[in-house]
Image: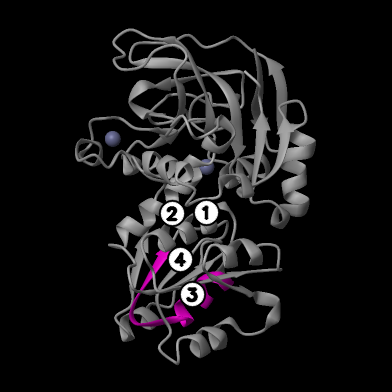
Amino acid sequence: MKAAVWHGHRDVRIEEVNRPAASTGHVVVSVRYAGICGTDRHEYVGPNFIPVEKPHRLTGKTAPLIMGHEFSGVIDEVGEGVVGWKSGDRVTANGTLSCGQCEACRSGRYNVCSKLGFLGVSLNGAFAEYVEVEAARLFSIPDTVSLREAVLAEPLACGIHATKILGGVQGQDVIVTGPGIIGLGVFFAAKQDKARNIWVMGLGKERQSLVESGGGVYFDLNDGDPVRAVADWSEGRLADVAYECVGSQTALDGCVSMLKPGGKLMVMGVFEKPPLLRMNDFQEGERRLFTSQAHTDEIAEALKRIASGQIPAQRLITREITLDSLVRDGFEELLLHGDRHIKMIIDIGG
Ligand SMILES: [Zn+2]
Ligand SMILES: [Zn+2]
């Protein structure tokens, strides 16, 4: 089968490899669409999480590995011991790999397993014609959701999970920095949870109409001081919650400055450089710091929201490419014009 195999930084090769077989408790999915995640772009240029010398603590694998964890497709083969799934079922999956034994796993929080791994990072992933997945991580795609739309459920689940960790945002004034797929997923999750006001901050005007049609207020950071804007909008109260979905010092500082005393900061960005946190800003105002790691079973909820039209999935797909053009039209394009894209998907066609 054809697959996109990570060999090193800027060295992803489209190769012929063996098709996986379904081991006990697993299925093989014929992949129809796959999504390129921010983490895939990170792996492409580094620093990478794909193990190179030291084998992964859970899977024991090292590079070369097939990339990709966001996908949709159809079950092609069912392994021994799998109950409730059959060939032909339309599915997507949570790419989290967990040990099933540590305290976090035993309490259902497998997304923070002590040996946490990820499909496409710690084990062969979904940028391929077929992928092997643990049956326990599968989600059935509702009839009214297309395979093309379903590929978005995984990243959109992150916003639903983070909002749950905050204990909900109903009636609150919310800021979202970084209107990529994660930030927009947060926006839809906060809207669904009945936040009072949602202010989305980003560079440029590309996302303005999407945010406004979803009932939010968009602020282009080229247009002035976002802290002053939030102070104006909130009549000086500032925000109850700020979601940091960028992973930069500037965004982080901005979020803290826009939070009222007692406000909550939710950090979801992945930082390439360790950021500086001024703890006095938290302590003096009893502000609170939260983090969120992927999701557990919120993909089911994301699929429901796509089905009901609450999330306009088709509008979030900004480009479709093929596996053969993944490097040039996918990774290199994202490095050059990352801001232009919300979600780029690969039509694998399986
Ligand atoms: Zn992802
Ligand atoms: Zn575990």
What label sits on residue 182 in the rendered view? 1
* Residues at discs 1 and 2 in contact (Cβ within 8 Å): yes
Q: Which of the pair 115/38 is nearer the observer?
A: 38
| Number of other residues with Cα within 10 Å of mark 2, as a class: few under 14, some 14 to 19, many 20 or more | many
Task: Look at 37% across and 38% down and name the residue there.
Answer: 300
Determine if the C-beta at disc 2 is less than 8 A from ligand 1.
Answer: no
Residue that carries the numbered disc 4 in the rendered image: 243
Tell me: residue 180, above or below residue 5. Answer: below
Task: Look at 39% across and 12% down and name the residue there.
Answer: 86
Q: Is residue 75 left or right of residue 10?
A: left
User: What span is in magenta?
Assistant: 250-266
Q: Amino acid at mark 2?
A: Gly
**Would residue 90 be visible to someone looking at this image?**
yes
Residue 23 x %, y %: 39, 10
Residue that carries the numbered disc 2 in the rendered image: 159
* Residues at discs 2 and 3 in contact (Cβ within 8 Å): no
Tell me: residue 41, above or below residue 244. Answer: above
Specify which label sits upstream in the sequence, 1 or 4: 1
- Image depth: mark 1 or mark 3 in front: 1
Q: CA distance from mark 1 to mark 3?
A: 16 Å
Q: CA distance from mark 4 to mark 3?
A: 7 Å
Residue 57 magenta: no
* Residues at discs 4 and 3 in contact (Cβ within 8 Å): yes
Residue 209 x %, y %: 65, 65
Q: Amino acid at mark 1?
A: Ile
What label sits on residue 255 in the rendered view? 3
Secondary structure category for the residue under label 3: helix
Tell me: residue 217, above or below residue 225. Answer: above
